[in-house]
Image (cartoon, helix red, strand yellow):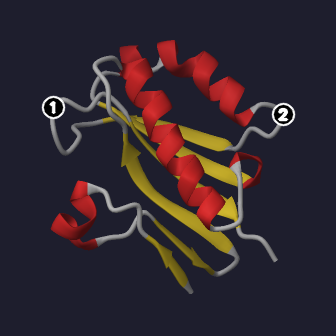
């Protein structure tokens, strides 16, 4: 098992790491991004996730499952082009859930599971 930390503020505070490589998969924790708009935060979260995947030897092409959490489901549609560009020809299974996030300033949280490299 391999644990990957991004050094984010919540990792030490809550007691988790950005990603864990185990059981043939890379499990990336729910990730929020920075910025004022949902699209800014979506791009920012994907950058953090991309780095975690890279640190695990994987990429977005290896993602098999993604979960999106938003306080307002109406804000999901503006993210569609960003997500389509990110996953391209390798779209994962996906779920979107409308719920509260850890801080009201966050508009989207993204969690992914990818196949780990051999």
Q: Determine whether label 1 and label 2 are within 8 Å by CB.
A: no
Q: Residue at x 36, y 32 (%)?
A: 108
| Image coords of residue 48 (percent x, y) | 48, 47
Categorize mark 2 by other alpha carbons within 10 Å: few (<14), some (14-19), many (20+): few
**As drawn, is 112 to the left or to the right of 106?**
right
Q: Secondary structure at mark 2?
A: loop
Categorize mark 1 by other alpha carbons within 10 Å: few (<14), some (14-19), many (20+): few
- Mark closest to the chain's N terminus, 1 or 2: 2
Q: 60 and 92: which one is in front?
A: 60
Q: 74 and 114: which one is in front?
A: 114
Instruction: Please state the total of marks drawn on the protein image.
Output: 2
Quadrant of residue 13 within the rendered picture: bottom left
| Image coords of residue 107 (percent x, y) | 30, 27
Say the numbered circle drawn on residue 72: none
Q: Residue at x 71, y 35 (%)?
A: 87
Which residue in the protein does label 2 denote?
89
C-alpha span from label 1 to label 2: 33 Å
Which residue in the protein does label 1 denote?
104
| Image coords of residue 91 (percent x, y) | 74, 38
Specify the quadrant that holds the C terminus. bottom right
Quadrant of residue 97 within the rendered picture: top left
Q: Residue at x 27, y 64 (%)?
A: 11
| Image coords of residue 79 (percent x, y) | 51, 20
Q: Residue at x 39, y 48 (%)?
A: 31
Specify the quadrant that holds the N terminus. bottom right
**As drawn, is 112 to the left or to the right of 30?**
right
């Amino acid at each position: 098992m391999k644990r990957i930390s991004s050094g984010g503020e919540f990792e030490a505070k809550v007691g988790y790491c950005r990603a864990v490589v185990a059981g043939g998969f890379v499990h990336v924790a729910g990730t929020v991004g920075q910025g004022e708009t949902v699209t800014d935060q979506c791009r920012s979260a994907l950058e953090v996730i991309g780095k975690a995947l890279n640190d695990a030897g994987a990429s977005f092409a290896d993602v098999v499952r993604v979960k999106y959490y938003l306080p307002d489901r109406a804000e999901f549609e503006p993210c569609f082009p960003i997500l389509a560009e990110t996953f391209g020809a390798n779209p994962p299974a996906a779920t979107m859930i409308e719920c509260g996030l850890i801080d009201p300033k966050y508009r989207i949280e993204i969690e992914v599971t990818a196949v780990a490299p051999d």
